[in-house]
Amino acid sequence: MRVVVTGAAGRIGTQIVEELSESHELRLIDRLPVPGRESVVADLVRVRPGFFRRLWHASSRALWEKTFEAAEVVVHLAGEADPDAPRRRHRRDNIVATRNLLEAAARHRVRRVVFASSNWVVRGQEQELAPACYSPEGPKIGSDAPPRPVNAYGLSKARGESAGRAFVDSGKLHSFVAVRIGSFLPAPPADERIHRWIGTDDLRSLLRRCIEAEFDGFHVVYGVSAQLETPFDLSHTRRLLGWKPRQLP
């Protein structure tokens, strides 16, 4: 299967590239070269109008869009991941870049986009339910929970989810899965992030299933490991993907 990975040089990108490199044909995009691998260095964000900028943009866009040819899946990991970054960077790198990517995927008839969303999309609901949601028997946040962001970062990821739903509903994409990723760290953290922690092995297997599982339509899944104190309900994630987390804190 031909799979395009954006943000391939990032923390999550390097993990999924290593995970898939022997089983899929990968096309890699990042603002920086991907060490040791062939990749396209490009920015997914459009530049402002202007003759020379239009020429530059046409060349740059043609370069990264070419990787979409005959691709079956795009894994969109590129973006601003710092919740404390300025709002303009969230708008540019998360909202505008995602829109450009979806348009390119639709033009090239890519069947599926796997979108790196975030648990920050529903942080407002988590705060409302806490601390009860951290109990194994407490209320949980499911895949049908609507976005309730509390900052610009969460809002930008919510916008990406909404855009993906619109592309599916309009028939431009067969499937779009938003992965509300938790706190990705190699080892369990010793602070409140433990409720949302996802380890390396679980992250890799989850994204692999998002690529390889058979489904159509728009879906939301959660990316957390097997800690009992998570605030998220993984029922739909398990059913849709045939996946369950295995790493324990």
Image: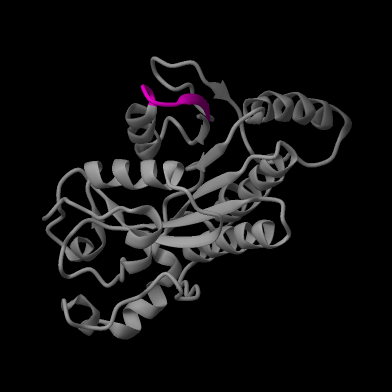
Q: Quadrant of residue 123?
A: bottom left
Q: Is residue 193 above or below residue 7?
A: below
Q: Is residue 7 left or right of 229 when viewed as pictured?
A: right
- Residue at image position (25%, 55%) is 244
The image shows residue 97 at horizontal and vertical percentages of: 62, 46
Residue 53 drawn at (x, y percent): 80, 31
The verdict on residue 59 being magenta is: no
Q: Indicate how the structure is coloured in the image.
A: one colour
Q: Looking at the picture, tell me which residue is in the foreground, 33 or 219.
A: 219
Which stretch did the figure color magenta?
A: 21-29
- Residue drawn at x 43%, y 16% as measured from the top left: 37
In this image, 60 relative to 115: left or right? Answer: right
The quadrant in which the C terminus is found is: bottom left
| Residue 153 visible to the viewer | no
Q: Position of residue 85 (x, y in %)?
A: 47, 54
Q: Nearer the viewer, residue 15 or 43?
A: 15
